[in-house]
Amino acid sequence: MTDNPFPKISRRGLLVGAGALAATGSRPARAVLNIDINQGNVRPMPIALPDFLTGGPAEGDTGRNVTAVISNNLQRSGLFAPINPAAFIEKITSSDSVPRFPDWRTINAEALVTGRITRQGDGRLKAEFRLWDVAAGQQLDGKQYFTTPDNWRRIAHIISDAIYERLTGEKGYFDSRIVFVDETGSKDRRVKRLAIMDQDGAAVRYLTRGDDLVLTPRFNPSTQEITYMSYGQGDPRVYLLNIETGQREIVGNFPGMTFAPRFSPDGQRVIMSLQQGGNANLFVMDLRSKQTTRLTDTPAIDTAPCYSPDGSRICFESDRGGSQQIYVMSANGGIAQRISFGEGHHSTPVWSPRGDYIAFTGQARGSFSIGILKPDGSGERVLTQGFHNEGPTFAPNGRVLMFFRDVGQGPSLYTIDITGRNELKVPTPSYASDPAWSPLLS
Amino acid sequence: MRKATAISAGLHAAVLLWATLSFSGKSFDVTPAESLPVDFISEKDFSEMTKGVKDAPKVETPKPLVEKKAEEPPKPIEEAKPKVTDKKELQATKEATPQPEPQPPKPDPIAEKLKQPDEPKQAKTEQPLPPKKPPLKPQPKFEPDKIAALLDKRDPQRNAATGIEASATPSLGTAAGSAAQLSQSEIDALRARLMALWNPPVGMQDASQTQVTIRIRFRKDGTLAVGPQVLTSGSGAQFNAMRDSAVRAVFVGQPYTMLRPEHYEQWKEIDFTFDTKQMFHDLPAR
């Protein structure tokens, strides 16, 4: 080796040097701290709903009305807490500009909805809204709809559903209707009329005149059609009724009483009970071919059948074991399996649209309850209990149940979350019973 | 009879006397145990035993000086290599038999070194001298009217002494030392804050989508440096709602003042896993 004060820089040396530099330049790999958050604080989400803006006097109070409907929907769901508008700091003047998020954070809003209603040149209403995440300061959703001016309520429900779905991850249920039996008059001279309304109790419309007694109306899952049991002269019969046209037809021509009808999920068939002597069996009728199939043949009362959402199975109520209990069997009939083993009787089973639960009316120790259990019979629990509760029906998203309760004078409609929380009375013009929840309209 | 009594009494007395004299009452000697100094410290203190610095100069313990050189062990006898000669095989063995003269012991360089006083090393281990105290100033008179002047007018600083600052001399520390680490109480406070703020979407049907992991980069003041980075991939309304609820909680929770600035290296990046699996389960059957 020569004593060269400046040693030659070899390519190899350079490479090694670069490697060393890279090694020192980057921090040694350190595991990032990982913290598990396995508990949350479930509470209604504070949401700010300033009145929708309107383009001018032509829209009148539509903006305010739409906001009021949305606010009412979200509040009634129990998952949202609309903030009192008096607390708002920023006044929204444009639905297109980004709101001042610190102003909304100050009043603890976690979500903010801004919107605008404008009348188009062709007379239609244009409704647009934006959903903002106040904490993150970003837009979560934004949509616009066109409709006729008298349809503003549906627009409000559709916007409510969009907000609900974006924030909860579940489909909404606000754009849906309830068909129920409206009851007026004194107790011994009750007039029972079939009525339909929005799920929030608005826009009530009567479907029958009250000449005949009506019971157990049920929605067709796919069209605007209902089936129900009615009797005036002669035997009670199952009918089909088109809500839009008012057209009515009898289902099947059976030599006896038919009752407790319900549509199949595809809307092509109606399943019902047919009384034969002292017992009743389940029959299904294809609405197009009018072909009837017997599903059960027992010396017992089999009734209140309901399809699973996929149409493969049926749950129904039967006293074949001595008392009324819930059974599940294939949609083609066959061997039925008892699934309810809790205390007392179980009746009026109804399968959740999302398939995870079957709701029922329970009867034990002199009180009636509304409960749910899983289709395999496990996880039975009572949601509400009292003097008289009956006839549960699921909201389209399977999160909420509606049922009727009679505390003495007459029945009223109530909703309850499947968690057993948030029990609310549904406003109806008079007494009401036998509610049936429609599928989502859109 | 009388005689017998006397003999008996005498013998008894003799036995008693012998017993009294011969059985010595040897007391139990308890050697006083040396008392151990015991300090009470909290678990936290224990778990946070001073952590040292990796690049601290190694403290050399002075090696004991060698006073006397030990006698050299005799060198192992080198095996004489037999000369490979075909003809004089016998002679070769004869030549190998005489023991070679033991070589005079060579001076061992290591031992020589050890003999020398370890001057430079000694100097290294010397502790730095404490700074010289300034000469005492004449004590100012206490004036009650001027208390304000005595108050510390420096701005409060968010600094706490741990790690390097706690121990005056940097050392390698204990291997498991964690004084410069995020303490469990800080993590717990952080977790509690997020648990209180996180409002997860309830009643989701799809139980598989219960988890979302979010990476957060913090500034030293406890606010988010950049937007949360979602590490879990997913899609659909349920995933979005879950993800947004977690992100919302992280945003609303800032600034995270429970995280102490001196531990910033540890918490400048944290992965949060939000999980609802343990939150929702079926209520017991009635």
Image (cartoon, grey):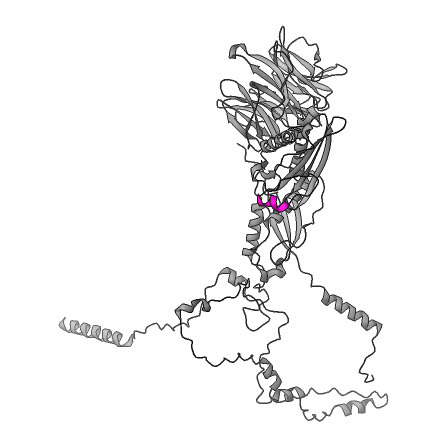
Q: Is residue A337 visible?
A: no
Residue at screen point 50% across, 66% down: B153
Q: Who is closer to the viewer here, A253 or B108?
A: A253
Q: Quadrant of residue A358?
A: top right
Q: Who is closer to the viewer here, A206 or B107?
A: A206
* Total marks placed: 0
Q: Is residue B257 visible?
A: yes
- Tell me residue A146's x, y (percent): 74, 29
Please give the range of residues in magenta. Answer: A97-108
Task: Identify the residue at the far right of this view.
Answer: B87
Is residue B122 found left or right of A293 in the rendered image?
left
In the rendered image, the vertical position of residue B47 relative to residue A255, given as above or below: below
Q: Quadrant of residue A352?
A: top right
In the rendered image, the vertical position of residue A226 relative to residue B90, given as above or below: above
Task: Identify the residue at the far top of this view.
Answer: A233
Residue at screen point 74% across, 86% down: B79
Is residue A8 found left or right of A322 in the rendered image?
right
Task: Identify the residue at the far left of this view.
Answer: B2
Instruction: Identify the image quadrant of the N terminus of chain B.
Output: bottom left
In the rendered image, the vertical position of residue A426 relative to residue B78, given as above or below: above
In the rendered image, the vertical position of residue B240 relative to residue A330, given as above or below: below
- Tell me residue A364's x, y (percent): 51, 24
- Tell me residue B56's x, y (percent): 62, 73
- Tell me residue B131's x, y (percent): 53, 79
Residue at screen point 50% across, 80% down: B134
Q: Is residue B84 magenta?
A: no
